[in-house]
Amino acid sequence: MPDLVPSLTFTDGLIPVIVQDAKTLQVLMFAFANQEAVSLTLSTGYAHYFSRSRGKIWKKGEESGHLQKIVRVCVDCDEDCLLYQVEQTGCACHEGYVSCFFRTIDGEVILPRFKDPADIYSR
């Protein structure tokens, strides 16, 4: 398998990552990754991202237990965006929804809440 990480285009050190359920193809979330997070994702088989607000790498599910096991990593034609197809444990959204895209732009909630965030993040 060729190492594509060096050929990826990182803008300001980051690359956008779209996350999709590998079975249903539902879009679960969007995040950014830096080169180290992409390398960790590929080497461990679990999704890692770069938190712009915290200024550090994080493994999805490190606090909640809602891990994302990598099934496939796809790169777009310009090599400036990634698609992680994952097996999601629990919910992807920190607000307790399966997908972060649980509401319309008008505020209508279109997905059921999977779990109360207070039960996920006890700290």
Image (cartoon, rainbow, N blue to C red):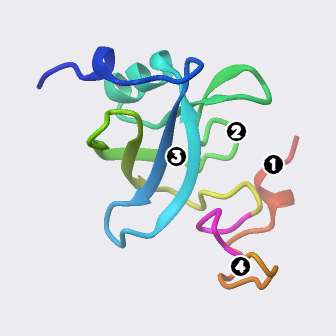
CB of mark 2 within 8 Å of CB of mark 1? Answer: yes
| First of labels 1, 4 by sequence position | 4
Q: Is residue 120 left or right of residue 118?
A: left
Q: Give the structural element (helix, strand or loop) at label 1.
A: loop
- Given residues 1 and 79, the one toward you in this image is 79
Circle 1 is placed at which residue position? 121
Circle 3 is placed at which residue position? 67
Q: Give the structural element (helix, strand or loop) at label 4.
A: loop
Query: Where is residue 7 shown, x and y percent of the image?
Result: 29, 19
- Given residues 101 and 68, the one toward you in this image is 101
Q: Amino acid at mark 3?
A: Leu
- Given residues 68 and 29, the one toward you in this image is 29
Q: Amino acid at mark 4?
A: Thr
- State the CA–CA distance, disc 4 to disc 2: 27 Å
- Counting other residues with Cα less than 10 Å from the Cα at mark 2, is it few (<14), some (14-19), or many (20 or more)? few
- State the CA–CA distance, disc 2 to disc 1: 7 Å
Residue at 59% across, 66% down: 99
Q: Which residues are magenta?
A: 96-103
Q: Amino acid at mark 1?
A: Tyr
Q: Give the structural element (helix, strand or loop) at label 3.
A: loop
In front: label 1 or label 4:
4
Residue 104: mark in rendering: 4
| First of labels 4, 2 by sequence position | 2
Residue at 59% across, 42% down: 31
- Counting other residues with Cα less than 10 Å from the Cα at mark 4, is it few (<14), some (14-19), or many (20 or more)? few
User: Residue lying farthest left?
Assistant: 1
| First of labels 4, 3 by sequence position | 3
Residue 35: mark in rendering: none
Quadrant (top left, top right, bottom left, bottom right) of the C terminus: top right
Circle 2 is placed at which residue position? 63
| First of labels 1, 3 by sequence position | 3
